[in-house]
């Protein structure tokens, strides 16, 4: 048993030495980086813009259909969001989802983010003393039915920011058609 183990050890050493010797560069082409000239070993440093690629394509093939540059949309997500911030952290809610803000918390509701943005679920769990949710139905959110006045008046008494939610997620609430016609 001992001789077979030492014999196998000798064979592995010989095979390893042979493999190591064959791995040395020989200077022949096609063996990797050592076969490349110094100028070809450097990475490309010139960035290529989309416009440059399109110009080169047009120059090489005049009949090619080039994509038309579309103007960037003038759309800003903050136009559709309100921000509730507290202790340097802020969360996003859709405009129209904040139903009530007490006077002492007016400075905590804004239309711009000021602080570290955290998800709604984390914010509501962390700052339960600041934000109160009020579950609404899809009909109430779309303005087909009015928001329950009893539940709303009870929620106002908490002194917290009242946010309309459906299944725990903030949702915009539209004014009912009858209420908006009276105004």
Image (cartoon, rainbow, N blue to C red):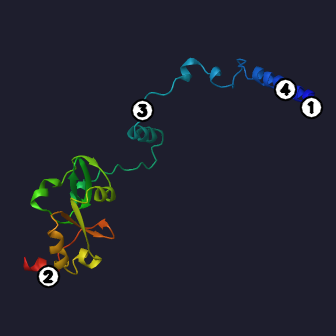
User: Could you tell me residue 33's position as x and y percent?
Assistant: 62, 24
Mark 4 lies on a secondary structure that is helix
Comes first in the chain, label 4 or label 1:
1
Q: Which residue is mark 2?
A: 178
Q: Position of residue 137 (x, y in %)?
A: 28, 77
Viewport quadrant of the C terminus: bottom left
**Residue 165, x across and y down, in percent:** 28, 69
C-alpha span from label 4 to label 1: 12 Å
Q: Which residue is mark 3?
A: 47
Measured Cα–Cα span from mark 2 to mark 3:
60 Å
Q: How many marks?
A: 4
51 or 154, which lies in front? 154
- Which residue appears farthest toward the left when viewing the image? 183
Do the residues under discs 2 and 4 have CB atoms within 8 angstroms?
Answer: no
- Numbered circle sitting on residue 1: 1
- Circle 2/circle 1 CB separation < 8 Å: no
Q: For the residue carrying disc 4, how many other residues have a C-alpha within 10 Å: few (<14), some (14-19), or many (20+)?
A: few
Query: Which residue is more in the foreground, 112 or 67?
Result: 112
Circle nearer the viewer, 2 or 1:
1
Inter-mark Cα distance, 2 to 4? 92 Å
Q: Is residue 109 above or below residue 170?
A: above
Few, some or many C-alpha atoms within 10 Å of disc 2 (few <14, some 14-19, many ≥20)? few
Q: Gap between marks 2 and 1, in whole Å?
A: 97 Å
Which element carries disc 1, helix, strand or loop? loop
- As measured in the structure, the alpha-carbon distance from the residue carrying label 4 to the one carrying label 3 is 53 Å
> Which mark is first along the chain, 3 or 1?
1
Res. 91 image quadrant: bottom left
Residue at the spot 56% in from the left edge and 23% down from the top edge: 41
- Going from N to C along the chain, the mark reached first, 4 or 3, is 4
The residue identified by callout 4 is 9
The first of marks 2 and 3 along the sequence is 3
């Amino acid at each position: 048993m001992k001789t077979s183990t030492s014999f196998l050890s000798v064979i592995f050493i010989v095979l390893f030495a042979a493999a190591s010797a064959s791995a040395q560069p020989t200077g022949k082409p096609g063996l990797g980086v050592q076969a490349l000239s110094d100028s070809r070993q450097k990475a490309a440093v010139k960035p290529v813009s989309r416009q440059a690629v399109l110009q080169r394509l047009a120059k090489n093939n005049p009949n090619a259909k080039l994509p038309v540059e579309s103007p960037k949309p003038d759309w800003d997500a903050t136009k559709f969001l309100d921000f509730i911030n507290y202790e340097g952290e802020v969360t996003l809610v859709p405009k129209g989802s904040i139903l009530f803000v007490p006077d002492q918390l007016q400075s905590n509701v804004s239309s711009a983010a000021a602080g570290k943005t955290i998800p709604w679920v984390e914010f509501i769990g962390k700052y339960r003393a600041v934000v109160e949710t009020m579950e609404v139905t899809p009909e109430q959110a779309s303005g087909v039915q009015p928001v329950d006045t009893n539940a709303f008046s009870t929620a106002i008494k908490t002194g917290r920011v009242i946010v309309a939610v459906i299944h725990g997620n903030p949702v915009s609430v539209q004014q009912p058609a009858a209420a908006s016609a009276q105004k």
